[in-house]
Image (tube, rainbow, N blue to C red):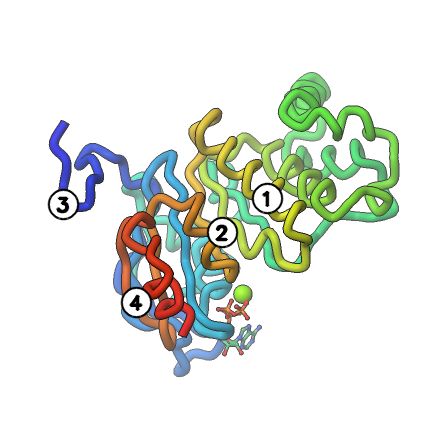
Amino acid sequence: MTMTRNGQSQNDRKMLEVRDLYVGYYKDLNILQNLELVARKSKISTILGANGVGKSTLLKAVFGFLKPNAGEILLNGESILETPTYKRIQKGLAYIPQQPGIFRDMSVEENLELGAWTFRRDKKRVRKKIEENYVRFPILGERSKQMTGELSGGQQRMVEIGRTLMSDPQMLLVDEPTAGLSKLLSEEVYRMLTDLRDREGLTILLVDQEIRKALKISDYVYVLELGRNKYEGPASEFTDLKKAFWVGG
Ligand SMILES: Nc1ncnc2c1ncn2[C@@H]1O[C@H](COP(=O)(O)OP(=O)(O)OP(=O)(O)O)[C@@H](O)[C@H]1O
Ligand SMILES: [Mg+2]
């Protein structure tokens, strides 16, 4: 296999490709400008950048919640610009937004079932997907009948991730999954993400503010500034602290 200067195999498949993207909330005001990004199969690609640079905006555009003013978004080499969100889900995309979205007054299992909404009539498949989650996250099996609001913050994130996995995604868009969690729980969440990559081959596009932690689990990193690409490179090139601070500042 030929390796590039960055140590990336040229055969690493591009799962998601964003080209020259312009997106905003109003027609003539683009938050993201000329944005370029690639997320490779079974890798964690991470987007860093200060508050308000447009990280969440980018994930929303990829998931189909915002319509770009210009540019291209390809999933497995095919344009998804005109593809509605529910069809992007069928094509393998899943989104875990910045605001946690579990239902606290529903049981763990009921929360998981919601992730099977599009195939809810197929009881066998719903059961199978739930059981897969209990194997993946045994604590959820133990707590299946408990109200989700009674779980720890990390376990609630686990329910949310498990619910997202019900639809068999190939690629997860994950927005600040450890915001507001303790150090210990954050580590649990990062381990869940690396396990999904390493054991199940999922492709992950992660937005994170915990620069140092995110760098540890990432394969490739993008830094945004004022809605534009500022830097990109393999996560290993960021390991020295000075660079990490430069990234932050
Ligand atoms: N629903 C909205 N309507 C109008 N403007 C918005 C909306 N959501 C975000 N914006 C604006 O778009 C810009 C980028 O916001 P975005 O949420 O993408 O930033 P971010 O990089 O995710 O920030 P943070 O790290 O704080 O989550 C900001 O200037 C914000 O005010
Ligand atoms: Mg955000």
Of labels 2 and 3, earlier in sequence is: 3
On screen, residue 118 versus residue 236, left or right, reads right
Of labels 4 and 3, earlier in sequence is: 3
Query: Eyeballing the image, is 67 above or below 85?
Result: below
Instruction: Kindly identify which numbered label has been placed on residue 213.
Output: 2
Of labels 1 and 3, earlier in sequence is: 3
Q: Residue furthest bottom?
A: 28
Q: Identify the residue position indicated by label 4 in the image.
A: 229
Query: Eyeballing the image, is 212 above or below 128?
Result: below
The crowd level at tag 1 (other Cα within 10 Å; few <14, some 14-19, many 20+) is: some
Residue 192's image quarter?
top right
Query: Eyeballing the image, is 49 above or below 99?
Result: below
The crowd level at tag 3 (other Cα within 10 Å; few <14, some 14-19, many 20+) is: few
Q: Identify the residue position indicated by label 3 in the image.
A: 5
Q: Identify the residue position indicated by label 1 in the image.
A: 187
Q: How many marks?
A: 4
Where residue 120 sits: x, y (%)?
70, 30
Q: Depth check: 173 or 176 in front?
A: 176
Q: Depth check: 202 or 189 in front?
A: 189
Identify the element where label 2 is drawn.
helix
